[in-house]
Image (spheres, rainbow, N blue to C red):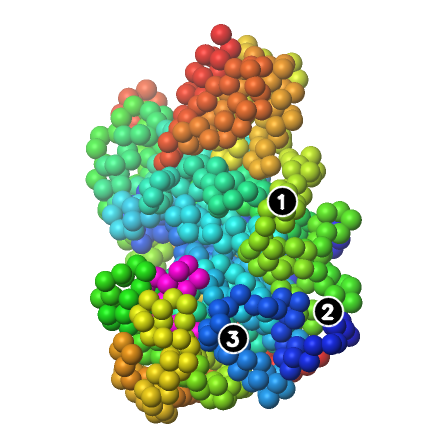
Amino acid sequence: MKKVEKREPKNPMENILRMDRIPHIWCAGCGIGTVVTSFAEAIKKNKEDLDKLAVVSGIGCTGRVAGYVKLDSFHTTHGRAIPFATGLKLAKPDTKVVVFSGDGDLSGIGGNHLIHAARRNMDLLVICVNNFNYAMTGGQVASTTPLTANASTAPYGNYEYAFSLPYLAEAAGATYVARWTALHLRRVTKSIQEALNRKGFSFIEVITPCVTLYARRNRLGDGLNLLKYYYEQAEIIHGADTRTVDIDYQGKLIVGKFVEKDKPDYLTAMNNHFTNVLGDDYQLYGRINHEKD
Amino acid sequence: MKKTEIRFTGFGGQGIIRCALITGKALALFDNKHATMNQAIGPEARGSACASQLIVSDERVLYPYITSPDILVSMSQEAYDKYEPELGNKGILIIDTDLVKPKSVRGKVNMYSIPSTRFAEELGNRVFANLVMLGFFTAVTNTVSTEAMKKALPGLVPDRFLDRNIEAFDKGYKHGQKALLKTKKAAAKKPAAPKAKQKLKK
Amino acid sequence: MKKVKADPKGVLTGAHYLDGDYAIAEGGLAAGCRFFGGYPITPSTETAEHFAGRIPKVGGIFIQMEDELASMASLIGAVWGGQKAMTVTSGPGFSLMMENIGLACMMEIPLVIANVQRGGPSTGLPTLTGQQDMMQAKWGSHGDYEIIALCPDSPQECFDLTIDAFNLSETYRVPVFVMTDECVGHMHEKVIIPPAEEIDVVERKWYTGPVGEYLPYKNDKDGIPFLARVGEGHRFHTTGLTHDERGYPVINAECQKVNVTHIIEKIRGNADKIIRIEENDTEGAEIVVISYGITSRVAVRAVQQAKKAGIKIGTLRLITAWPFPEKRIKQLAKKVKAFVFPEINYGQMVREVERASGNSCKVVSVPHCGGWVHDPQDILDAIKEAVK
């Protein structure tokens, strides 16, 4: 039996959000909330069992997502959401585990975990909200900041080369890779739906406006201006070669579903391997399907 | 309290660590002794001189390392050169005849030698040299029982080679008995001879 | 606290000749650990290797993570997934685990970390012994918290205390350290593993209330909150931030006070139940030698010689280093002339003895850098000096 919440507010997402924690901390014009909306939409459309879906976040603005979704949700340490999620998934394989975090958390401090979870084809969906900077701490340069963009720790502009996250994820072994912007909400929803319906390591990058810091420091205007930029510069190329999807400062944004391939996920590979090698001595681990009790 | 310190030495790949493991397990599990085994690990355990140590006692072993071994088994020249000086004056020295050229035996050290590697090759594979050596060691030192040693083997040698290992052990053991007999005779013949190399310890 | 018998699948009943590292793995399996996330590091690797070999036939997960940060994080995830979890490491890896050890303390996660100590600092002496991480075990992560640390002195105790570590961790919802060292870790001795029905295992304190009403940090009568696991409909939240009983972040001093006081007091308040020490001949002793782990065995040799020399001497062995048995030390301090404390570091736990004994008696540290155990003669010399 679900606990009955206060019934007055008619927020369409109240079944999925912790209404007792709203209002959230995100700035006006921030794109994280829209990605959360897409996520909620995808869950609804997929008719996901909300009891068997967990969200793990690291630290940062996007790291707060875990605190707002009314699912089993874990707000962990900076950079370690993926290994935490790995333990969670392996300990309870019948639960779908979604890592919801930011670019700094996932590809900066947690970059090593990102590539290794992708390499293992761990059955996780990683939603990476990329706003090109460390926002929670005040707009510092990140591993995703485009060349020449200004950041508080790159006050004369950034001269470090940035990660192209889809390329990184694919090279490391991710079996589903997509990129969208905060403008492509329906596409984001669809990608999340697809990823939730498959097994293996899925990586969805969503480029979002950070109005308060990245946009202000770079004099890019407000949220609307950034959405206009996405509108003008985004080009959908499904199956694009991920080597070609780098992002230049205020340059072209190639988006789309870049990678989708079948490959046994970690647990399936483990069970298959041990069954082959050890035969009857092997204690088959975990329930393979997401079936309900 | 009777305490015996044993050091097995040789080069990497000879099964030196295994020697101490088998003997320790035999003593601890089947001969009702306290047996604490330690090994040098890390880069120094691979290649060149390799050593493992075993302390046997009627009571709990307190100090976990060897201070002055009562028994030194050497299966390589390098190991012999390195570890021989620390052998006690009344100790037992056991060497592989073909692999170690000993200096003159000092003090009241009893030396026994066996061509363990050659014997193992005669049995079909030199990997059994350590078991030949252990059989020999069991016969001449009287530290551990034959039964215990044989019981200790499963799990420490591959199952499919268990018989071959026992065969190697027996070969070494028989050679050890002969060596003992020879020593006894020699001792009886010239009991006062200072050069009597091989004398039973107890 | 609910005790059950060990799951026979994980119990390798019989007499074995094992080293301390292997015995830790067997202890974990016997205690019901079915998740091991680790990263190889000398001299602890054998534990991971042994667990990796055994677990497919027992039923569970061994995963070699990409580093120790990931290992610790995976353990916490695995516990929320419902498993009992452990890892093993040594100095440098222990340092890398510290941040997430803090998260485990804050989230109140039962798990076990074995540290097979080697000489430090930094890469130090990978293959040689040390007891230099004792203070790091207590204070290594930032902030105020309490943990439990046990110190086995033999492979047999590596087995026994790893089971105890799991039981304590489940009882108090706290990370527990098995602080052994290279010497014990690589020492082979006889290890008796009893039949499963003779091994008591503390079962997780599962939440059994109505679905959807689970509060991860609402204290039960005994002061310890219940644990639930993911995927059972509770849809709970937990965080490393200062939090209320719902697990929701509350960023203020009042909440911090409740939160931090709880994670400290659940251990300090139960210290008498947790602490285990082993005393010999302390009644009427002039000198008491305090030690732990391998050093306690070496110290006994010196004590035997001191007795022969006519010194009234006893020993006190710390089986739990943390929480520290300060009450007992305080009592003894009023009766003895001096404490002598050898340890394979430059004087760490001895500070606790100094603190607990005040000015009641002399406290003589017998420090020793990493690499080797003490020469018993050095301990004997310190005893003779102390008795003067």
| Discs 3/1, front | 3
Q: Is residue C108 above or below residue C354?
A: below
Residue C251 falls left or right of residue C200: left
Where does the image place residue C212, in percent across and percent down from the top left? 73, 69
What's the magenta bit mostly, secondary-structure-wise?
Answer: loop
At horizontal 60% and vertical 72% (from top left) the residue drawn is A69
Q: What secondary structure is found at the residue carrying circle 2?
A: loop
Residue C212 circle label: 2
Write the residue at 41% across / 56% down: C40
Q: Nearer the viewer, residue A168 or A287?
A: A168
Residue shown at the point (25%, 47%) measured from the top left: B48
**CB contact under 8 Å: marks 3 and 1:** no
Q: Count the marks.
A: 3
Q: Is residue A129 magenta?
A: yes
| Closer to viewer: mark 1 or mark 2 | 1
- In the rendering, which numbered label is found on residue C257? 1
Same chain for mark 1 and mark 2? The answer is yes
- Residue A215: x and y in percent read 36, 71
Observer-nearest residue: C337 or B163? C337
Residue A259 visible in the displayed image: no
- Residue that mark 3 sits on: A33
Residue type highlighted by circle 2: Gly
The amino acid type, in three-letter code, at marker 3 is Gly
Boundaries of the magenta span: A128-141
Q: Is residue A238 above or below residue B59?
A: below
